[in-house]
Image (tube, helix red, strand yellow):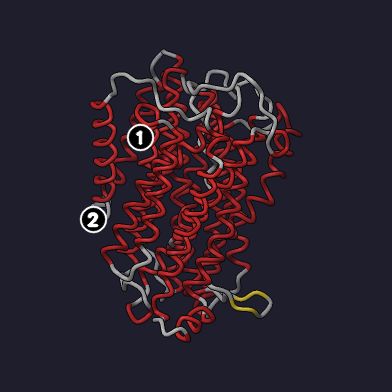
């Protein structure tokens, strides 16, 4: 799961250390913990069902789209969620404040989920649009408020973000178990039939459950709002940058439209990569130290984009593999295929303390940021190497669940090496006057990686084991090549970083 964003350096910070909350932390942390937990419950609960609902036939209660169209929609949706976070942060910083942005965003998200509870293609797409807009408002600004609970010198700050990150993963773990059971289990479908309701509409009960989760988050946020009265204020009265708002909005929508066009014109993806490489070279060979650091940031951007393009196929390629080609049984008990979306969170909860201990133990001997990024790419490449024999075995029938358990382990190791390290590195490399822009770049890497994940997932097919094995192998080779290049460039990137480890 993606970690929370780093707070802006210009956020007002408390002058008195508050210790009235859980574990001696500010009381507002508990409020934000549960609000974010329920918001992530709603997001990942719906995401676990999204591509499955689109590819299922009408006779199975779905929309009956083919895999390519479904993956393209999925990629555009997940890309837009991250991309609009830049716009949502701008609106909060310059117009309404983080506290109000979180409230409005949560209301819009809940409305979107409840729209998807109706059996209509129109309300389905309206729901996706609403969730995208609402998440863009909520996601960056709730993390900003976590940071504003602490002063920069407060030693509890990192621990506070770690607690907050655990809320993300608790929500992401629990939600597919709930929404997946409602959408896919025979027990719930039989119960609906017993009540005289259409069991084919079970998918919409899952979408509605995601909305209920967001509603719980909103109730928690409103009932405990006094704990946050000192943070997330709107900017002081005065002129508002309406012109810049228009430019940010138009830029975001233009990029979404351009990447949407890549569904029909894949060459646009290669143009995008070429532009990124050109930008790295442009900044790297400038004498200004800040320019060289921008070049290093763009190298990390490129690597993160490739990483997310594989990792974020969890909700598309790997969900389809789990649904169509995996024996979804545990000690003889069948479970819905959407439950696989909880496995990454389990590994995060288990591995996060291990990596925290490892980095402390290694101290100054730990690998540099470029090497950690390269290792992150290596592990995600190995996860798809693992799927090559798994794909070949599908020629004999469905494969056992341990293939996906091992895959998610490898991908989570990669996530621990790249995602939190990348967030920390961005904040250290960014020139102070460009911190907001650099954090926007980090969001953009996730956005474009999510879209590329959807493009790649469109080539998934479950009917030919050899073609499927080639599908995984080609992606593993491509990421493996990027890994080797990044390992080779690591000394050069370290030099660009100008002493930042």
> Which badge, 1 or 2, comes first in the chain's sequence?
2
Distance CA(mark 1)–CA(mark 2): 21 Å
x then y, percent, for residue 487? 55, 37
Q: Secondary structure at mark 2?
A: loop
Residue drawn 36% across the image and 41% down it: 83
x then y, percent, for residue 176? 53, 63
Mark 1 crowd level (few <14, some 14–19, many ≥20, 10 Å Cα): some
Question: Can residue 396 be seen at all in this image of the molecule?
Answer: no
Q: Quadrant of residue 204?
A: bottom left
Question: Can residue 154 be seen at all in this image of the molecule?
Answer: yes
Quadrant location, the C terminus: top right
Q: Pointers 1 and 2 in contact (CB under 8 A)?
A: no
Q: Secondary structure at mark 1?
A: helix
x then y, percent, for residue 486? 51, 37
From the viewer's side, name the closer residue of 314 and 292. Answer: 314
Location of residue 83 with respect to 121 vertically, above or below: above
Residue drawn 37% across the image and 37% down it: 88
Q: Residue furthest right?
A: 361
Q: Which residue is mark 1?
A: 276
Q: How many marks?
A: 2
Give the label on residue 264, or none. 2
Q: Quadrant of residue 433?
A: top left
Residue drawn 55% across the image and 38% down it: 373
In the drawing, does residue 63 fall left or right of residue 489?
Answer: left
Residue drawn 32% across the image and 78% down it: 58
Mark 2 crowd level (few <14, some 14–19, many ≥20, 10 Å Cα): few
Location of residue 378 with respect to 64 vertically, above or below: above
From the viewer's side, name the closer residue of 460 and 67. Answer: 67
Give the label on residue 21, or none. none
């Amino acid at each position: 799961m993606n970690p929370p964003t780093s707070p802006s350096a210009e956020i007002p910070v408390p002058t008195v250390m508050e210790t009235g909350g859980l574990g001696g932390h500010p009381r507002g942390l508990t409020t934000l913990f549960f609000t974010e937990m329920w918001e992530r419950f709603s997001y990942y609960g719906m995401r676990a069902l999204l591509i499955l609902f689109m590819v299922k036939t009408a006779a199975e209660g779905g929309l009956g789209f083919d895999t390519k169209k479904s993956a393209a929609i999925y990629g555009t949706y997940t890309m837009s969620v991250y991309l609009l976070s830049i716009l949502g942060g701008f609106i909060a910083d310059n117009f309404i404040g983080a506290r109000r942005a979180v409230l409005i965003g949560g209301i819009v998200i809940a409305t979107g989920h409840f729209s998807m509870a109706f059996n209509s293609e129109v309300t389905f797409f309206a729901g996706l649009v609403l969730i995208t807009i609402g998440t863009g408002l909520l996601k960056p600004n709730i993390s900003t408020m976590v940071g504003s609970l602490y002063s920069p010198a407060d030693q509890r700050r990192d621990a506070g973000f770690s607690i907050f990150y655990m809320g993300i993963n608790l929500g992401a773990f629990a939600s597919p178990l709930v929404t997946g059971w409602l959408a896919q289990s025979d027990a719930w479908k039989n119960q609906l039939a017993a009540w005289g309701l259409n069991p084919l509409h079970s998918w919409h009960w899952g979408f509605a459950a995601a909305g209920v989760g967001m509603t719980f988050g909103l109730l928690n946020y409103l009932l405990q709002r006094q704990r946050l009265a000192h943070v997330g204020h709107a900017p002081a009265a005065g002129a508002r940058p309406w012109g810049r708002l228009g430019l940010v909005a138009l830029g975001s929508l233009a990029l979404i439209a351009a990447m949407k066009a890549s569904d029909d014109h894949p060459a646009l993806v290669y143009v995008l990569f070429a532009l990124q490489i050109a930008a790295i070279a442009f900044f790297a060979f400038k004498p200004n130290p800040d320019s060289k650091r921008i070049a290093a940031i763009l190298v990390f951007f490129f690597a993160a984009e490739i990483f997310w393009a594989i990792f974020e196929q969890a909700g598309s390629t790997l969900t389809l593999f789990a649904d169509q080609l995996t024996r979804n049984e545990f000690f003889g008990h069948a479970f819905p295929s959407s439950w696989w979306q909880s496995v990454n969170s389990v590994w995060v909860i288990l591995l996060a303390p291990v990596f925290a201990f490892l980095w402390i133990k290694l101290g100054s001997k730990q690998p540099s940021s470029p090497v950690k990024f390269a290792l992150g790419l290596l592990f995600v490449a190995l996860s798809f190497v693992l799927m090559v024999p798994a794909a070949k075995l599908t020629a004999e029938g469905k494969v056992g669940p341990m293939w996906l358990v091992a895959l998610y382990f490898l991908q989570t190791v990669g996530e621990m090496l790249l995602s939190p390290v990348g967030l920390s590195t961005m904040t250290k490399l960014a020139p102070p006057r460009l911190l907001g822009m650099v954090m926007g770049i980090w969001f953009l890497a996730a956005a474009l990686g999510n879209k590329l994940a959807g493009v790649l997932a469109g080539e998934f097919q479950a009917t030919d084991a050899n073609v499927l094995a080639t599908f995984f192998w080609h992606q593993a080779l491509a990421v493996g090549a990027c890994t080797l290049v990044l390992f080779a460039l690591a000394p050069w990137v370290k030099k660009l970083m100008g002493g930042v480890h």
